[in-house]
Image: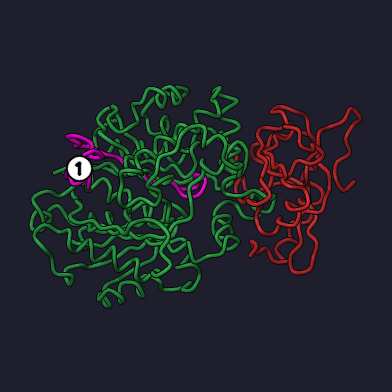
Amino acid sequence: MPEVAIVGAGQTRFGDFPDRGVKELFAEAYQETLASVDRGMDPADIQAAYIGCLSAGGGFQLGQLAPLLTSYVGLPDIPSLRVENACASGGYALVAAICAVASGRYDLVLAAGVEKMRDASANRARYWLGVSGDTEYERLAGLTFAGIYATMARRYMEEYALKREHLALVAVKNHAHGAQNPKAQFQRQVDVDTVLRGPEVASPLGVWDCCSTTDGAACVLVASARVARSFTDRPVYVMGWGAASDHLAIHDRARITSLRATVSACRQAYQQAGVGPQDLDLAEVHDCFTIAEIMAYSDLGLCEEGRNAALLESGATRLGGSIPVNVSGGLKAKGHPLGATGIGMACEIFWQLRGQAELPSRQVKDAQIALSHNVGGSGGSAVVVVYRGG
Amino acid sequence: MGAHVSIAMYQRNIPLRYRLVGQRCQTCGGVNFPPRAVCSQCSKGTRFEDIQLSGRGVLYSWTRIAGAGAPSEFAAQAQALGSFVVGLVQLEEGPRVVAQIVEVGRSAPRLGQRVEAVLRRIYEEDGVIRYGYKFRPAGDAAPTPPGK
């Protein structure tokens, strides 16, 4: 029996919000989370908060961002901690909340993520993105975040005869999903030709292969199984989770066509959950670049190594397929507000496993078991969580 | 806004940045570059001797960074050239290293292609030009290690 459950979830739309700062975004996701609890709840019951954020609110609050945010929403007393592991900050905040509850110390903990990226000039946004690799040796050779994944993509194409068109198919699929998600940043479809004709960012990746910069916030309420049913008849249980790291720099890794941190985190999560990839009804996967989703297919066991392109081409990972991947639109179309991304994945899974997708057309039918996969930077850290509906 | 590496921090790494000085692990004999506190090969060794790397290697992978996407400290270079190539080079002695690949023009480099290190201007910060290694296609003549 799982010890930990999620009993509420809320998320802002991901996108570009000139009228809202990091505090307002956080407050919106928090209020939606409170309202989502079926039997209602008293905010005074929340005992601790873990908040994922990479940029410390765009750099304006380097210290104590988390107490600032929780006091803003009327929780000035509880222990509140910012969690930072680049793009996996949200995933690690979720795992911190799960551990805090599983330890027995707390019964109800807020796991959140927030990022305000659109206030930053293009230069400053590139700064925040470019310092999550090994700054001294990757960044100072002129390599960008996209450039690191592009280097992986080139090697992957060589080793596995992956075609440029396969990368494009990931963008096409995830934009088709995002087009149905009212909370997605980009709610429009694209076709393969558009993706292939897009301006180059870091070859072989073009602009449509890359996630955007995004504002957004997301929260989930993590409860002990003991109290979960006092909040709802339909908690979403955490069956298992795993977290792992790898060498930050790609030059230190034996391989660059697989993320070792993902493989390790995933093994832990399946083991604890007592399920395998064949049991999953959907997966929210870290597709910061199109190549990242392709690599994740085999890293998460959805296919054997080398069968990744075939899995994609088969349509199995589309909505309606045998293992839909990123029905939310993924980082690619839903958007990637760094620290909020990992919590946003948990929100999507909370809604899908409770049959609450806004549109019937984007609901995965009879979804029981789901997986989320959140990666820091180019694979320096990763978190995998397996959930089941109550 | 550029990634900040102070002059003091850069200065500590001059031997490896100018001359590709690596570490040989006294426990397993494995070569580390850049240096580590614990050997990346055996995960045990903590005692090392300096080793001069040859600067010869082959291209393991690469990307061409578009001008508009370049990090801010490389923006002027990207503007002047339109784009630049960054590669992952597999050195003869074993380690891989990330560096710019120069003298390739607009042509697409080839994986497995032989390259050699050259000492070049990398970027400028705090009014100080930072020099370091880049790689270029290896000619037929025996290459000279950078800084020699």
Residue B32 can be seen in this image: no
Q: Position of residue A130 (x, y in %)?
A: 58, 55
Q: Position of residue A276 (x, y in %)?
A: 28, 30
Q: In this figure, what is the number of numbered marks?
A: 1
Q: Nearer the viewer, residue A4 or A287?
A: A287
Q: Nearer the viewer, residue A298 or A40?
A: A40
Q: Nearer the viewer, residue A275 or B135?
A: B135
Which quarter of the rendered picture does the N terminus of chain A lie within? top left
Rendered shade, chain B: red
Chain in green in the render: A
Q: Residue at x 74, y 69 (%)?
A: B126
Q: Residue at x 58, y 57 (%)?
A: A126
Where is mark 1, residue-wise? A353
Q: Secondary structure at mark 1?
A: helix
Left or right of B137, for residue B45: left
**Disc 1 chain ID:** A
Left or right of B17, for residue A200: left
Q: Position of residue A182 (x, y in %)?
A: 30, 50
Q: Nearer the viewer, residue A168 or A373?
A: A168
Indicate whether residue A8 is drawn in magenta: no
Q: On screen, A176 above or below B49?
A: above
Which quarter of the rendered picture does the C terminus of chain A lie within? top left
Q: On screen, A268 above or below A55?
A: above
Type of residue at label 1?
Leu
Q: Which residues are magenta?
A: A354-383
Q: On screen, B118 above or below A313?
A: below
Query: What is the basis of the colouring in this image?
Result: by chain
Q: Residue at x 45, y 68 (%)?
A: A57
